[in-house]
Amino acid sequence: MTKTIRAAAIIAGFCLLLPSAGCRYNDAFEPNDTYETATPVMAGVEILATVGQDNPDVFSIEAPAGKTIIFKLSHRGHEDCPEFTVQGPNETTLYQEQHGFCGDPPWMAETQAKGVLVSGKRGSGYELRIPAGEAGKYYLRIQERKQADNLFSYSWDYSLTALIE
Ligand SMILES: [Ca+2]
């Protein structure tokens, strides 16, 4: 075992024991916590990312009018507890889930524009289908839900693929 591999293994072990150390939160797309700093995604290109509590991830995609944007997310590890928000052009909220704890199922929508379809559940991935009423930028915001009793911040490793059909 080389020194580098040994050091990486020690850090990985430390992160498992102490997730609050922040090591879970490093993905290639930070900072992307706000709509202004959203990570642009290309249709059909898979993104591998990690969202942490108090560290939301925002992605944007350009869509022409009349198409449907499909966000597909799948579980890759850690705590699968996402809360989704979708915003369209002109800061229109098209979908917003109720805030709550991870253990508060079912996660109901607070806002759901006409034609928006959301399916999936913990462990099996999620799919959000968003009709693009007008051309422009659409945003997906992912927030990790809290647990009622967690001492340390949780995070979720996921993959995201956006499609335009
Ligand atoms: Ca983030």
Image: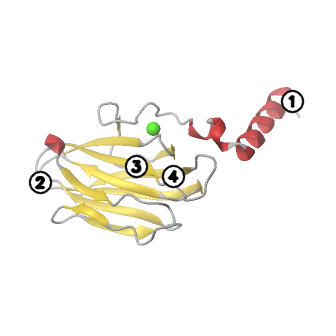
User: What residue is pinned by disc 1?
Assistant: 2
Q: CA distance from mark 3 to mark 2?
A: 22 Å
Q: Is residue 136 visible?
A: no
* Dots 1, 2 in contact, CB < 8 A: no
Q: Secondary structure at mark 4?
A: strand
**Cα distance, mark 2 to mark 4?**
28 Å
Structural crowding at the residue carrying mark 4, measured as other residues with C-alpha within 10 Å and reported as few (<14), some (14–19) or many (≥20):
many
Q: Nearer the viewer, residue 64 or 49?
A: 49
Mark 4, ligand 1, within 8 Å: the answer is no
Q: Which residue is mark 4?
A: 158
- Residue at mark 2: C-beta within 8 A of ligand 1: no
Please name the amino acid that badge 3 sits on.
Ile
Quadrant for the N terminus in the image: top right
**Image disc number at residue 142:** 3
The residue sitting at 40% across, 34% down in the picture is 32
Q: Earlier in the sequence, mark 2 or mark 4?
A: 2
Give the mark toward the camera: 3 or 2: 3
In the displayed structure, 20 sits above or below 149; it is above
Of mark 3 and mark 2, the one earlier in the sequence is 2
Q: What percent of the width, then of the height, locates residue 22?
A: 61, 36
Is label 3 in contact with label 1 (beta carbons under 8 Å)? Answer: no
The kind of residue on which mark 4 rests is: Tyr
Residue name at image x 57 percent, y 57 percent: 79
Q: Are circles 3 and 4 on residues that touch, CB within 8 Å?
A: yes
Dot 1, how many residues are within 10 Å of its Cα: few (below 14), some (14-19), or many (20+)? few
